[in-house]
C-alpha cells in the first residue's frame, strides 16, 4: 500500500498466483532476498555455493515466514560491475525453473534491471519483477 496525491492509501500489489493469495495476508508482507551474486552488498551471495544449498535457503526463508522470494542475479551495490543478460539468466533461471517444476507455492520475484531478463523469467514462471533502476 502507498499514498496517492490525495493522501489516500492505494493497494499497489494485487498479486495472485495459482497457489497463493497475497491480498489475504494483510498490510505487511515479508520478502526473502536471495542473492545469486559473487559480490552482494550484504555479503551473503550464494553464487558458487551449489544448487542444493540455494534451494535449501529458499525453503528456509519460507519456513522463517517469507511471503515472496526475490531472486537476484546481478549486484546493484555501488561500484559493482554490470553483467550481461546471458550471465544473469544463467544465475537465476535454473532456480526459477526448478521451483516452478516442484510447484513451490510462494510467489517468485526477480530482481533485475534488464527487460530481456524480465521477459524471459516471467515466461519461465516468475510472478513479479523487482526493478530497482527506477
Image (spheres, rainbow, N blue to C red):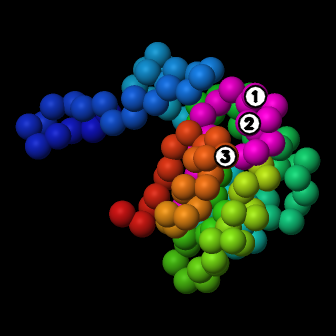
Query: Of residues 129 and 80, which is closer to you in this image?
Result: 129
- Outermost residue toward the left in this view: 6
- Disc 3 to disc 1, how far (Cα)? 13 Å
Residue 5: assigned label: none
Secondary structure of the residue carrying tag 3 is loop
Q: Are marks 2 and 1 in contact (CB under 8 Å)?
A: yes
Relative image position of residue 128 (x, y in whole percent): 51, 43
Mark 2 — residue?
100
Q: Residue at x 75, y 62 (%)?
A: 91
Name the image quarter holding residue 30. top right
Residue at 60% x, 34% y: name it.
107
**Which mark lies nearer to you, 3 or 2?**
3
The stretch in magenta equals 96-112
Q: Which residue is mark 3?
A: 124
Closer-to-camera residue (100/105): 100
Q: Is residue 30 magenta?
A: no
Dividing the image into 4 quarters, which one contains the N terminus?
Answer: top left
Seen in the picture, residue 121 relative to 11 is either above or below; the reply is: below
- Mark 2–mark 1 distance (CA, rounded to whole Å): 5 Å
- The image quadrant of residue 6 is top left
First-in-chain label (3 vs 2)? 2
The secondary element bearing badge 2 is classed as helix
> Label 1's element?
loop
Q: Residues within 10 Å of mark 2 (few under 14, many from 20)?
A: some
Calculate the distance from the C-alpha at mark 3 to the C-alpha at mark 2: 8 Å
Determine if the magenta segment contains residue 111.
yes
Task: Confirm or deny contact between disc 3 and disc 1 (CB under 8 A).
Answer: no
**What residue do we see at 69% from left, 71% from top?**
86
Up-down relation of residue 19 to residue 12 (above or below): above
Mark drawn on residue 103: 1
Amino acid at each position: 500500500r502507498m499514498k496517492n496525491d490525495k493522501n489516500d492509501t492505494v493497494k499497489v500489489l494485487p498479486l495472485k498466483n495459482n497457489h497463493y493469495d497475497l491480498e489475504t495476508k494483510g498490510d505487511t508482507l515479508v520478502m526473502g532476498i536471495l542473492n545469486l551474486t559473487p559480490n552482494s552488498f550484504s555479503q551473503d551471495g550464494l553464487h558458487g555455493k551449489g544448487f542444493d544449498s540455494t534451494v535449501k535457503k529458499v525453503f528456509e526463508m519460507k519456513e522463517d515466514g517469507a511471503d515472496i522470494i526475490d531472486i537476484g542475479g546481478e549486484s546493484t551495490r555501488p561500484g559493482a560491475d554490470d553483467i550481461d543478460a546471458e550471465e544473469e539468466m544463467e544465475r537465476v533461471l535454473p532456480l526459477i525453473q526448478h521451483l516452478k517444476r516442484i510447484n513451490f507455492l510462494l510467489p517468485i520475484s526477480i530482481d533485475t534491471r534488464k527487460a530481456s531478463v524480465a521477459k524471459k523469467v516471467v515466461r519461465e514462471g516468475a510472478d513479479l519483477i523487482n526493478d530497482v533502476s527506477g
